Image (spheres, rainbow, N blue to C red):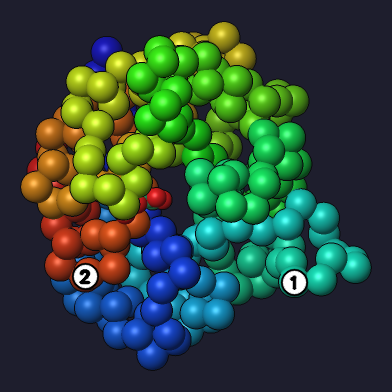
Amino acid sequence: MSKNRKIIIAGNWKMNKSIAEAEELTRNITMELGETSEVDVVVCPTFTALKSVGDIITNTTVKLGAQNMHWEAEGAYTGEISASMLRDLYCHYVILGHSERRTYFGETDEIVNNKVKAAIAANLKPIVCVGESLEQRESDQTKDVIKGQIEKSLAGLGENLDKVIIAYEPIWAIGTGLTASPEQAQDVHAYIRSILEEMGGTDIAQSIRIQYGGSMKPANAEELLSQPDIDGGLIGGAALDASSFAGIVNAGIQK
Ligand code: 13P
């Protein structure tokens, strides 16, 4: 089946960049990209840089995303940020359940599920991350792990299942320079789509975009993005450099 899903390339800047540095990176990205509209482009700076980055991209095709949020609308949750606060800053996307949040901050599939529901209710598009560790891959548990993460993180969405974007990020490929081969990634992406089909039917499963993340760079992007079930990239390290990030976006346009 041919892909009629629009490629989406998102930069996850993680805990990097001062406001001034984030502004400079954003200006450079918008200069490199021009009026790109063949591919959806998203930048996800830290909370502290969202306003400044958002101001720079207002009149461009680049959209703003956050890296996390809380599931409650407001209240006594010291240090947290709600979905409506992100909408206030003109965020369109939010990354949820990144492996770093699962590993270092104890985020479970149930927490991710609460966040996904709150994001959708606030009209934010959730980018829901799943992925196996090296140990899980080596002991042949990849598909069981992915199935559990997808089913639990996306439980109870009903018709809203089509509002999510999924990012498959094998933990062993994040920040390591080790990329999943196009075949390894495609295999898991197709499997994710089959689970989505069980959950929401064919039409919804075919419409959901599944990004790959883990050491994606200009040199490997085109081959990854050419796979039938890879619909974009969630980029860490290479998103911190405007020409690398633009190179990946251009690979998405070429493929
Ligand atoms: P790297 O591109 O640095 O491997 O990071 C991937 C990632 O975690 C994006 O969310």
Residue 219 % position (x, y): 9, 47
Up-down relation of residue 6 to residue 1 (above or below): below
Residue 17: give x, y in percent of width and height. Answer: 39, 79
Residue 56 can be seen, yes or no: no
Extreme-bottom residue of the structure: 20
Tag 2: amino acid: Ala
Residue 164 or residue 77, whichever sits in front: 77
Q: Can residue 30 be seen?
A: yes
**Of the two numbered discs 2 and 1 in the rendering, the one whose residue sits closer to the viewer:** 1
Q: Which residue matches tag 2?
A: 242
Q: Which mark is residue 79?
A: 1
Q: 111 or 87, which is in the foreground?
A: 111
Q: Image height check: is 165 above or below 204?
A: below
- Say which residue appears at 64% left-offset and 65% top-offset: 87
Q: Residue at x 54, y 40 (%)?
A: 128
| Circle 2: element type | helix
User: In the displayed structure, does residue 71 sit left or right of residue 97?
Assistant: right
Three-letter code for the amino acid on which mark 1 is drawn: Gly
